[in-house]
Amino acid sequence: MVSGSEIALLSVFVSTIVASALLFVVIVVKAVHRRRMRSFERRYAVYLRLLAQQVAVKNPRRKLDSAVVTDPAFLDALIDLRQTVKGPEVEKLDGLVDELGLVAHQEKLLHRRWPPTKRFRAAVALAEMGDDSSTATLITALEDRHQEIRVQAARGLARMGHRPAIDHILQRLGAETPWVRARFGDTLIRFGNAATEPLVRYLRAGATLADPEGAVEVIRILGAAGDPEAGPALLDALLHATHPEVRLAATSALGRVGGPTAAPIVLAAFDTGGWRLRTRAAHALGELGDPIALPRLERALSDPDWWVRRNAASALAKLPGGTTVLYACLASKDASARDAAAEALAAVGAIAESRRRAEAGLARTDDLRLLALVEAT
Amino acid sequence: MILETLRWVGFAILGYFILMQVFLLVLSLISAWELRRIHITNRFGRVADMMSSQTSPPISIVIPAYNEAAGIVEAVRSMSIVGYPRFELVIVNDGSTDDTLGKLIKAFDLERVRIPYRPDIPTAPIRAFYRGRGTVDITLLDKENAGRADALNAGINAARFPYALCTDADVILDAGCLVGAMKRFVEDRVRTVAVGGNIRPLNGSTVDLGHLVRARVPRRIIPRMQLLEYLRTFLAGRPAWSVMGALPLISGAFGVWKRSAIIAVGGFTVGHLGEDMDMTLRLHRYHRDRGIPYRMVYEPSAVIWTEVPETLRVLRRQRMRWHRGLMRIVRDNRSLAFRPRYGTLGMVIWPSMIAFEYLAPIIEAAGWLLIPLAVYLGAINLSTIGLMLLLAFTAGLINSLVALLLDESYGYFNDAKGTGRLLVMALIENFGLRQLTVAWRIRAMFGGRTTHRWGNMERRGVGNLGREELAG
């Protein structure tokens, strides 16, 4: 039978060995990591200088060896330089990339199953280089099991402006995690107006019903891209979609996309949802800047919901004639409407103007009312 | 009989410390796995794209300030250029008696305004509101003094965006910290209610105009000991809690909260010495009690830097305050323990916090008294005790070394001197400093009303520095 002290002795022996080994490992890891980092920084600096010479000088003396394509420092230097140069320098760099067979090498790494970090790095490199010859690889990579590679693939295709990829990305949108969906969304924005038509097609194909989360992301993208061609589809979504988040997203997007038909429809939809829809509608009407919204926004200053009143005041400040309504609201019995009006007037510099006029002895009634409200505790 | 009892009590105490270190080691291993996964996402998942994304959720940065005239302007300037597309700064002057308010108004060209302030959470009266007229979106509230929690509540009330970062006026935000934290919200906007960040001691580092230029291991022993503690906590503990869905604490220096969630639970508890842990646990209870799906996570890439106490006097105040806060939290949340309704938090993490944090000073103090007595009376063999102490020591050392290994992915302390200082600290921290913190915590448990106060932390102020090294 093993005694307690024998167990204690054995445990101490084992833990001392483990602690000693770990101590050794920590020292070695830190030393190796430090050396690797410094070596990486040195190589990076050398590659950057060489690449810059290749680009700047007509017949550079020193040529690059194709073995550099395996060096991550070279890849980083190439990517960083590519992001800073323009015009003919970019073509020179692309020519160099072809000469070295860099794209083929990265594609080979990406096609492997292991190791994952080399695959990730290959995906980043292909995305950053944006070489047309890698489009097929990147489109395949949109289905990769690692989300980081899917994100990189989409980025690369957007950098190339490869329009057929838009539909591929859209097909994946509904099945993706929210994080990847958001990154795909940023990628689609990069396509600019070229993405409008596929995105609109996606919405009109019933996405608002079948895939509301994907539809919300698409609407958000259309709003961020700001292409007026998307207006009709967004109006459709606002009027006919049943999912509340889709309608909310469409309302917000319409504020950015604009268009002459937007304001009347947003106005018509103002009271067809809850306080969230009214809030977004008020905000959108302010962005659209159409004075037909004035009466409705003035009524919204007395809305039962606090956020609606606040957004209505903020929107009025952006409309022609809106500040007149806001000054009148300073006399309202509703304290939060008065405060919302004062906040909106401050945003357009009215308080500073009122103070200047007051100091010059030219203050109007509205100025005095505004300053009195501001100074009250 | 007495000797036999003493013998078993002595073994039990030592067994307790060995068990604690084993538990921490298990947490470290889980943390290592989670950190690796997060590291890959952050390195290759284009998290930085969020800095220019037009669809990133907007955030309000709430900064309570009390008598921060020395460094508030530089601190706010530094926060105003944090890398994030859409945010506002909401500064709450909590009845400062120095010129905090005046300095802010002058430096940022603030004008007195009126805003539709809705007190979703009741607070002390607000005297005035100010807004910036420049490019930085700043709202300043001037209110009557009522403490940090009350100031945070006022800031939450005034915040215009759905997410609020609650932080302090004397921290330095790392360039990508907001992006890192908000990424966790984007992953699951519906369920995520809070994200905690990674706090690192700034002492000994080089700071220039309110920005970290180079991180260094502090020369002084006291901040260096705390650096090791923070590494163990934030790298070897929190990731594990987070992945288990049982994060008991989102630190007050960096916590991003869903504004509606804070309002739903009535805001931070005014006068509480541990308002951050109190809020975290209340959110857990609120959602669990109502069956609302939620998550609270920790993001290790959301790094902020803060000054830690450099003297024993200030460290003592801090540790006594923390322990008093913990005592109240344990008292208020006793019913969490061993309740299946609260999941891993209730069944594992909360009981372990009570056992290994709250009770640890008492058990350790009892050990220092009883074990020598047991040896003297011959109840325990000196060599056996020595072996067990050595076992506890090596287990603790293993945990510190694992934390140092996990820190390597950040690459902050990769010079030989810094590594050496940290390794020496890992070896010596159990000989004196640890026992001091135990004594302070005992004092906090049994001390008088003087232990109930916040105390003056005597910071130099990170925003008040030019290009110089912080002492340490």
Image: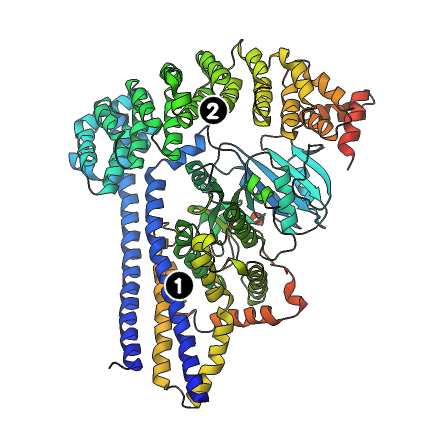
Q: CA distance from mark 2 to mark 1?
A: 59 Å
- Viewer-closest of B5 and B292: B292
Viewed as shown, does residue B96 lie left or right of B59?
Answer: right
Residue B222: x, y in percent?
A: 49, 65
Residue B348: x, y in percent?
A: 43, 59
- Per the rendering, the mark at residue B83 is none
Q: Residue furthest bottom?
A: B377
Question: Is the residue A60 above or below the residue B450 in the image?
Answer: above
Q: Which residue is mark 1?
A: B421
User: Mark 2 and 1 residues: CB-CB less than 8 Å, in contact?
Assistant: no
Report which quarter residue B108 is drawn in.
top right
Residue A143: x, y in percent?
A: 26, 30
Q: What kind of element bears circle 1?
A: helix
Q: Residue furthest top?
A: A260
Q: What kind of element bears circle 2?
A: loop
- Per the rendering, the mark at residue A243 is 2
Asked if one can make out residue B69 in the rendered structure from this viewpoint, the answer is no
- Viewer-closest of B234 and B416: B234
Q: Return the chain for callout 2.
A: A
Q: Return the chain for callout 1.
A: B
- Classify mark 1: residues with Cα within 10 Å, few (<14), some (14-19) or many (20+): some
Residue B438: x, y in percent?
A: 51, 71
Total number of numbered discs in the rendering: 2
Q: Residue at x 36, y 45 (%)?
A: B38
Viewed as shown, does residue A209 lie left or right of A156?
Answer: right
Q: Quadrant of the N terminus of chain A?
A: bottom left
Q: Quadrant of the C terminus of chain A?
A: top right
Asked if one can make out residue A188 in the rendered structure from this viewpoint, the answer is yes
- Residue type indicated by callout 2: His
Viewed as shown, does residue A254 lie left or right of A332?
Answer: left
Q: Residue at x 65, y 16 (%)?
A: A296
- Residue type indicated by callout 1: Arg
